[in-house]
Image (spheres, rainbow, N blue to C red):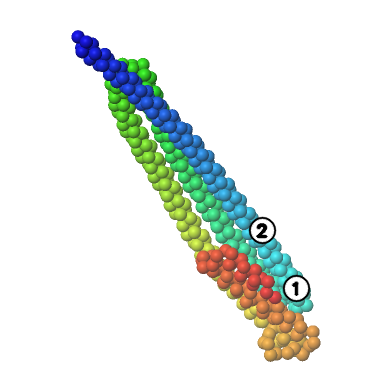
Amino acid sequence: KVQMDADKKVKAEADRVAKIEADKKAKADADRKAADARAQLEAQRKAEADAKVKMEADRKARDAADAQAKAESKIRQEAEKKVAADAEARRQAQQAEAEARAKTAADLARQAKAAADARMETARKAQLEAGRQAEAQAKAKLEMDRKAAAESERLARLKLEEERKAREAQEAAMRKSIEAEAAAQKALAKAKVDADLKAKADADVALKASMKAQEDAVRFEREAAALRVKMEAAAKVKADADAKRAAADADRKAKEAVEAQKKAEAKVKADAEAAKKADAKKAAETEARLKEMERKRAEDERKAAAGKKPVAPATVPPTARPPGTKAPAAVTPPSTVKPETKKGPVKPKEQRLKELLQLYLTDKITPREYHQQRAKILAEP
């Protein structure tokens, strides 16, 4: 009986020690789980802070990109205004030069006879008309280039807007996935805390409750991980689909813009060809009229010379203008020679301007090269 009492005491002491050890182990496990929960909550807060920092950086990058796009648009508009101002200044200079040339021609023509005056006036009007037509064609070309640049800029803005919307959709999906993950982690932490409280309350069955809580926690973590993976996959698929749809829309709009630009260029080329044909026809008609007037004037002078033989030496030099002949009178040679010297250098310059305009209308040179070469030609004496 004493041995049995001793065995009972030893067994009770062993049970008490085992219970104390189990309590210590349960408390240690509970403390460890609480520390893990606190670490997870800290990691979650840190992840949320990193996500906020990233979102702020993305917003600043978008703002910087928008500001840069606005600055580039402003620079392009200023460049277009400057080009238009330069074109207007060149047009005014050309107009002033044409007016000065017309005044000089008028001063020289007043010293000549009525026939020479009429011929020079007709030639001057033809040249001014050709210059105005060339200027109108150049303006039409510049207007088409400006419209094409505006259209391309509008398409670029639309593309940037589509990209911004796609980025916002991706960010929204990312935020949703982060919020879902945070909710899952919060639920997991809450479940762990509840399990720890239950383990502390149920001290008698601490080991069994702890094992059950661990199994529940593992199962919950697996379910939360599966749910998080599923939500991330769905968000990624949706974001990829939105990005592909936005890219497809942008490509379609870009193709439409390219087609519209090609049609506009084809129309400009057709208009240039029609204008070229009209200019050639008008030049031919003007040349024919000049030849007819020259022929009539020559016939009139011959008739006048045949009718008035004593005055024949004074009337012959204005009609026949070979470079080697000399007029007997002292007043007539300056009147005949000055139009020839004035008319000589103007004709190659006009021809060069027409050739340069044709090169520009056929897209063989750029607008900048056209204006530079045109300014050089006009600046020549």
Compared with 330, 56 (above or below) is above
What residue type is disc 2 on? Ala
> Which is nearer the eye, 87 or 228?
228
In the displayed structure, does residue 375 sit left or right of residue 193?
right
Verify CB contact (< 8 Å) between mark 1 and mark 2.
no
Compared with 98, 189 (above or below) is above
User: Which mark, by number, is residue 85?
Assistant: 2
Q: Quadrant of the C terminus?
A: bottom right
Query: Residue at coordinates 67% horizontally, 79% vertically from top-left?
Result: 344
Report helix, strand or loop for mark 2. Answer: helix
Q: CA distance from mark 1 to mark 2?
A: 28 Å
> Which is nearer the eye, 313 or 258?
258
Q: Earlier in the sequence, mark 1 or mark 2?
A: 2
Query: Residue at coordinates 51% horizontally, 68% vertically from top-left?
Result: 364
Q: Quadrant of residue 302?
A: bottom right
- Which percent across, then down, holds residue 55? 50, 39
What residue type is disc 1 on? Thr
Query: Residue at coordinates 44% horizontally, 47% vertically from top-left?
Result: 250
> Which is nearer the eye, 190 or 292?
190
> Which is nearer the eye, 151 or 236?
236
Q: Which residue is mark 1?
A: 104
- Which percent across, then down, holds residue 17? 31, 19
- Which percent across, then down, holds residue 234? 35, 36
Query: Residue at coordinates 73% horizontally, 90% vertically from top-left?
Result: 326
